[in-house]
Amino acid sequence: MDQVIQFLFTYHQEIFIVVLATFLGFELIANVPSVLHTPLMSGANAISGVVIIGAIIYTGHASDWLDITVGSLSLFLATLNVIGGFVVTDRMLEMFKKKNK
């Protein structure tokens, strides 16, 4: 328990930034009009692609089990984000195609 408290006191600024970014990101994404959704997803996919490359490099240079776990988890989550982004973008683009009669 002392290690957890010590961690929280040591990294309180970083924890605050992550929590603030989470709330800010949620509010921004929740208020995006559907017209802008597809371009934003393309940008998010590009960022997640960079995260995937960083996760591969990080995991490749990992020296202990914690680094391997964090790298693998980030690689998995970024890959899920890219796949989900492509699926949602494809769905959005299907809405603009002419329907066959």
Image (tube, helix red, strand yellow):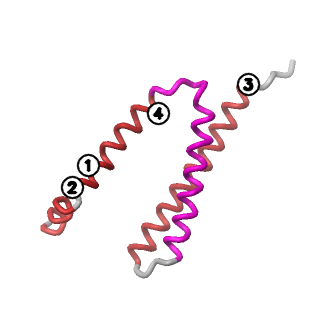
Q: As drawn, which residue projects farthest toward the left? A: 2
Which is nearer the eye, 40 or 89?
40
- Give the mark nearest the N terminus, 1 or 4: 1
Q: Secondary structure at mark 2?
A: helix
Q: Secondary structure at mark 3?
A: loop
Q: Secondary structure at mark 4?
A: helix
The kind of residue on which mark 1 rests is Phe
Pinpoint residue 76: horizontal percent, then vertical percent. Answer: 53, 60
Write down the quadrant of residue 36 in the picture.
top right
Residue contact at pointers 1 and 4, CB within 8 angstroms = no
Pinpoint residue 15: horizontal percent, then vertical percent. Answer: 27, 53
Dot 4, crowdedness within 10 Å: few (<14), some or many (≥20)?
Answer: few
- Give the mark nearest the N terminus, 3 or 4: 4
Compared to residue 64, the image places residue 43 above or below, namely above
Residue contact at pointers 1 and 2, CB within 8 angstroms = yes
Image quarter of the N terminus: bottom left
Q: Secondary structure at mark 1?
A: helix
The kind of residue on which mark 4 rests is Ile
Q: Nearer the viewer, mark 3 or mark 1?
A: 1
Compared to residue 65, the image places residue 24 above or below, namely above
> What residue would you read off at disc 1?
16
* Separation of marks 1 and 2 at Cα, in angstroms: 6 Å
Pinpoint residue 77: horizontal percent, then vertical percent. Answer: 51, 56
Question: Which residue does the image show at 40% across and 80% down from the upper left?
Answer: 64
Q: Which stretch appears magenta?
A: 31-60
